[in-house]
Image (cartoon, coloured by chain):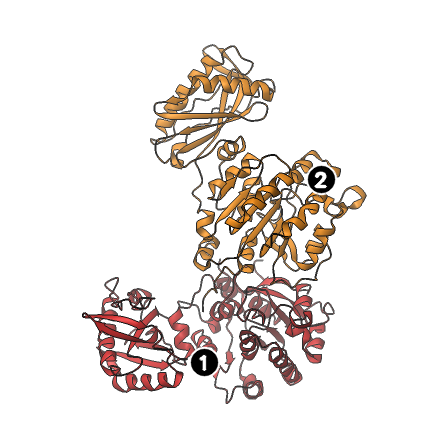
Chain colours: A red, B orange
Amino acid sequence: MERVELLKELVEENNTKILLIVLDGVGDIPSFEGKTPLEKANTPNLDKLAKESAIGMHIPVLPGITPGSGPGHLALFGYNPLKYEIGRGILEALGVGLEVTENDICIRANYAKVEEIDGKLIVLDRRAGRLSTDENITLTEKITNNINDINGVKIFMKPGMEYRSAMILRFPERVNSKMCEIFETDPQKENREVISPEPKNEESNKVSIVLKEFLKKVREILKNEKGNYLLLRGYSTPPQIPKFNEIYKIRALSIATYPMYKGLTKLLGMEVKDVDGYSIKDEIKVLKENFKDYDFIYFHIKKTDSYGEDGDYINKFKVIEEFDSFLPEILSLNFDTISITGDHSTPTPMKSHSFHPVPVLIKSPYVFKNFSERFTEKECLRGELGIIKGEDIMSLLLAHSRRLKKFGA
Amino acid sequence: MERVELLKELVEENNTKILLIVLDGVGDIPSFEGKTPLEKANTPNLDKLAKESAIGMHIPVLPGITPGSGPGHLALFGYNPLKYEIGRGILEALGVGLEVTENDICIRANYAKVEEIDGKLIVLDRRAGRLSTDENITLTEKITNNINDINGVKIFMKPGMEYRSAMILRFPERVNSKMCEIFETDPQKENREVISPEPKNEESNKVSIVLKEFLKKVREILKNEKGNYLLLRGYSTPPQIPKFNEIYKIRALSIATYPMYKGLTKLLGMEVKDVDGYSIKDEIKVLKENFKDYDFIYFHIKKTDSYGEDGDYINKFKVIEEFDSFLPEILSLNFDTISITGDHSTPTPMKSHSFHPVPVLIKSPYVFKNFSERFTEKECLRGELGIIKGEDIMSLLLAHSRRLKKFGA
């Protein structure tokens, strides 16, 4: 039996409250002074909490595998990230802030510079000369002002960073993944011909017709622009994934500042509250205003990851200290079970997500406690939770909040 | 998704170099002075390396399962040893130094003493009175001098230890496992009739005819010998197994002194260099001469296992000390990622392979380090890698040499 099926069978409702705090990319490896940012940070509140909690490490996917934010979060929410995959186009659409429904095909659309040579459309620059984000916004507006609907299929589009954008084809009815089996138009190298979005089966034929008509119009609208075409990739439909709130029979709230995390949790069936600003303080405000109405709250802090990606050791440990300063306020809300973890590690020396295990803390009345001194990678490696799978965390949170019945008699 | 499929998708080439040193059967349990051979051995170089590395334990197959050399090595090379099995006949053939191709059916052929009683061929001694290896060599020569080819199928045979030998039927075309579905001829008990190698399906009919003809000739050739017949078992075809170098997109070299390890790695697609001698020094010579031309080197040391099987505690820890003395030379070659481990444990008090976890070390720039004092079983049980699967090692080596892309966005 699959884990989520087992949990669905065992779960029962009660009035406990669970808080899952995700410090995105918090895990690291030793660098400056031989310390990780978690070791370097002065975190009196987190230290105290670690002593009273169970800590350990989790592996989001498999040892050695570096998770993207999608698989990393799916694991935290209890899904097998090798079974449930979220298409590239979906994440891109969620990332730029497009809302994704079950009637949508999502597509990455990148501005490019093309030229017609001997009747063939040749890609001169796949990134349209590193188009600026501002130029992108202007071009995308031009397209959305001129194209709303093709053959009854609604078209939505939003600019991303630089030359990247995402678009959605919204059908009157639910879509299926067969409809996405269409050739990607990006030839992947410069000075090659643009590929036509031909269908690979009968079901994708209708979609192909819409895309061809769309690209014809785009070519016309952008003809005098620096980015004069769009290269389409990553056609994808929303994943066939059981809803979070339905598996766990739980009223779930998502608090995040970045569109991708808001979109992903919405797709999983959580309610999403907008945060007015990007600071931890702004998020705490939303938490305090809303926590009473929910049983489970996902609370996402992005900056630990952003500074990791930038290789900015100092700001990474400082944002951990900032989070620590808000911890008493969070604890005062009296959640029954609290977890603090990351969706993956983002070591500052690597400036990228990594395969390293991720520190995890679980506070509940049912832990051994007095086993660890601090919430650091090394302490977590020796913590009472041991090294667990990312998927295990959600089971443990439900268990610690006594929301899981006995399995078998 | 299966692990090797996932890795194949994520792997990308770069110019890093990986060294996997397998101290066969190195793991042990405490005995003399309450210490394991790894604890007893004086290993200043290995101690220093352990401090700078990540260490842990690996379980080759499952807790409690004692791996043969086949499954133990498959796990180290990243294959699920429960999915990919290597037939007994194949390992036997590789072990005696026969080269196995995709056109081959491999068979264990054991010398026996038989007698015709009432027109029936009865087995008097299944081991031909514990035939000596020398007698085996003589008998095998007699057979191979007289039989080369039956019905267009080439016959190869090589003596093993005592009464054991291995043979290969080499067909003009690729074989399949259906062709091996033939009754084994060994009745498993003395004073029973030899079983005829009858086919179990249509595809094995041709093979059965060859075997019957072969046995008829063997009976004639050996009629006056101590071992006057061959009992056939373990018919097997080469495993349908994705090639190591193709999954990992890596130029792989195998350095080993024993035929079985050379044969197994060749079967997986590695290049095998012959070693002139059996000592670690002889193997180091081959390593130094060839490491520049490969990305991945498998370096096998057999004696730790042999002494374990003999229950020879003193020589087991001495061979570990001998290996330690060569470590500076190995480290001077500047591999980016080095792993030292075993394919299984061979505790001296047990004089056999065992189910115990196996110490593993990974040296790379991306480990926590300063976490462990020595490379011993007890330190490994508390090491930063934790207790992992044998299969995880290859994923980790690729990850530490930054040869794996991010999984998902």
Name the kind of residue labelled 2 in the image.
Lys
Residue A173: where, in percent of width, then height? 29, 74
SS class, disc 1: helix
**Viewed as shown, does residue B363 lie left or right of B102?**
right
Q: Chain of mark 2?
A: B
Tell me where residue B208 sits by quadrant: top left
Label 2: which residue?
B316
- Residue A16, image x and y in percent? 59, 77
Q: Is residue B66 visible?
A: no
Location of the C terminus of chain B by quadrant is bottom left
Viewer-nearest of labels 2 and 1? 2
**Residue A147 appears in which quarter of the rendering?**
bottom left
B305 or A401: which is nearer to us? B305
User: Which residue shows up at 73% across the image and 40% down it?
Assistant: B318
Q: Amino acid at mark 1?
A: Pro
Q: Chain of mark 1?
A: A
| Residue drawn at (35%, 31%) of the image | B172
- Check disc 1 and report the residue beneath it: A259
Task: For label 1, count other residues whose C-alpha is less than 10 Å away and answer few (under 14), some (14-19) or many (20+).
Answer: some
Residue A29 sits above or below residue B28 on the image = below
Asked whether residue B155 is in view, the answer is: yes
Across and down, in percent, residue A70 comes to 47, 70
Q: Residue at x 25, y 62 (%)?
A: A201
